[in-house]
Image: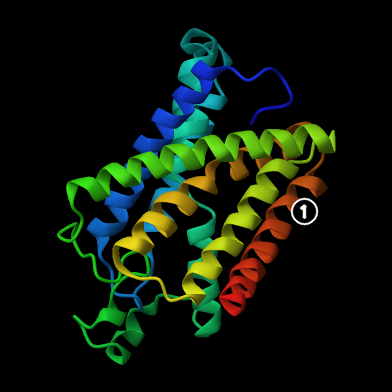
Amino acid sequence: MASGRTIDRGELLAIFIGGAGGALARTGAVIAFGAPARAWPWSIFVINPTGAFALGYVAARPPLRLRRGIYAAALLDTGCCGAFTTFSTMMLELSQMLDAGRLGLRSTRRRASPAGSPRSRSPHGSTVTGGAGVSAPDWNAVGLLGGAASVARYLLGGIVTAAGRSSFALGTLLVNISGALALGVLIGLRVHGTARVLLGTATLGAFTTFSTWMLESDRLGRYERLRPATVNVVASLVAGVAAVALGRLLG
């Protein structure tokens, strides 16, 4: 996250490129999974830990970060890992599971939604299965929107963190909660198909981040105290689910 220092255009470009790649990879994975809406959302719950592991692996090795330089770190960490993982979509999945009263595997409820019907598809692209409905211009848009959203996340998070003057991860918290609220509004407006992929999965998915949230929580626990780290995790989860629910009402 930016922290009040002079903005480096090269760094922003690296974040944009990494964010575009991360958003494309995540969107492709979500579409490829193509799980029915009532099945367990495997894509997000595989993508997020994978991206968090990758970010943690690099962050735990300062010599590796120094050899790569600031631009490589911006491209891979803030850009690629930040956009590959997503907080807002995970909050949407949790909110929908809570609404239906099922936090276990949802495959037992598949019969309630006939296979092949529009509602049986993942909320990330109800009319797009297996990438068949995504054209080349659409994929270009996913990359551009994901890159732009990653830069916006970096800038907004940096401004909030610098203004707060606290070791607590206020920037990531605000970014994630606002993105979850926006995704809730999108769902409330019943946006479907390619528009859902571009606005929800690509843009808001890249704007919010799971990996950075986990890395900052880990650092709070290591270098501060366990209490603020726990607050960061629990508060983000509760506020994230509540933001999605509020957004759905507003939409």
Residue closest to the eye, 102 or 163 = 163
**Residue at point 45% right, 42% down?**
83
Kindly tell me whether residue 25 is visible in this rendering: no
Residue closest to the eye, 21 or 199 = 199
Image location (x, y in percent) of residue 93: 48, 68
Kindly tell me whether residue 178 is visible in this rendering: yes
Say what amino acid the circle numbered 1 marks. Answer: Val
Query: Label 1: how many residues lie within 10 Å, few (<14), some (14-19) or many (20+)?
Result: some
**Residue at point 47% right, 12% down?**
68
Q: Which element carries disc 1, helix, strand or loop?
A: helix
Report the quarter where the C terminus lies: bottom right
**Residue at point 37% right, 55% down?**
198
Q: Is residue 94 above or below residue 171?
A: below
Q: Which residue is mark 1?
A: 231
> Which of the 4 image quarters holds residue 14?
top left
Q: Is residue 201 above or below residue 80?
A: below
Colouring method of the image: rainbow
Q: Residue furthest left?
A: 132
Q: How many marks?
A: 1
Q: Residue furthest bottom?
A: 112
> Which of the 4 image quarters holds residue 128?
bottom left
Image location (x, y in percent) of residue 200: 43, 59
Left or right for 149, reference 155: left
**Residue at point 49% right, 14% down?**
64
Report the quarter where the N terminus lies: top right
